[in-house]
Amino acid sequence: MIEVGAQAPDFTLRDAQGNAVSLKDYRGKKVVLYFYPRDNTPGCTREACAFREAHGQFQAQNAVVLGVSRDSETSHQKFAEKYNLPFTLLSDPEHTVLEAYGAWGEKKNYGKVSMGTIRSTVVIDENGVVEKVYAKVKPDTHPAEVLSALQGE
């Protein structure tokens, strides 16, 4: 994973509507950049819905939530509509951003080893510096954990 204190690598990815979104667009705000394996899977859906439920509280902390996975823009659009997600989902089909942040790597699932997205989150401060890194998070409780840290609890 990327190191705390490092300058967050800038990137430009497409959102669910096909618009280009860059990290630098959010300078002056904290960015909660959460990496997840796949739209519409049980754990990823629970995590996204938990971020949805806390959305207003993240906004109150001057923070934006950006979800990143390898899914297509169309998949993100359907996922966001189905679960009424109020935050931006970004498509990283070539996993370049996932790799830059250390969220792409070897995974073991039911005895099989493969490369894939490592569920993790990076909090970036208002100046683009990595403030906190959460590796291998639990989808159900993780959004509350990030929010508590932002609130200084």
Image (cartoon, helix red, strand yellow):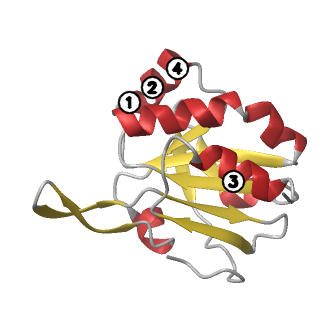
Q: Give the side of residue 52 with respect to residue 91, left or right.
A: right
Element on which disc 1 rests: helix
Relative to 118, say whether 69 is above or below.
above
Looking at the image, is mark 4 or mark 3 earlier in the sequence?
4
Amino acid carrying label 2: it is Phe
Labelled pair 3, 2 in contact (Cβ < 8 Å): no
Labelled pair 4, 2 in contact (Cβ < 8 Å): yes
Labelled pair 1, 2 in contact (Cβ < 8 Å): yes
Looking at the image, is mark 1 or mark 4 earlier in the sequence?
1
Looking at the image, is mark 3 or mark 2 earlier in the sequence?
2
Q: Tell me the residue that label 1 is attached to.
A: 75
Relative to 128, say whether 14 is above or below.
above
Element on which disc 2 rests: helix
Depth check, mark 1 against mark 4: the one in front is 4
Q: Tell me the residue that label 2 is attached to.
A: 79
In depth, the one of 78 and 48 nearer the eye is 48
Q: Tell me the residue that label 3 is attached to.
A: 146
Residue 46 position, x and y percent, is 48, 33
Depth check, mark 4 against mark 3: the one in front is 3
Q: Give the side of residue 40 with respect to residue 7, left or right.
A: left
The label shown at residue 83 is 4
Residue at 69% x, 70% y is 132
Element on which disc 4 rests: helix
Q: CA distance from mark 3 to mark 1?
A: 26 Å
Circle 3 packing at 10 Å, graded few (<14), some (14-19), many (20+), is: many
Circle 2 packing at 10 Å, graded few (<14), some (14-19), many (20+), is: some
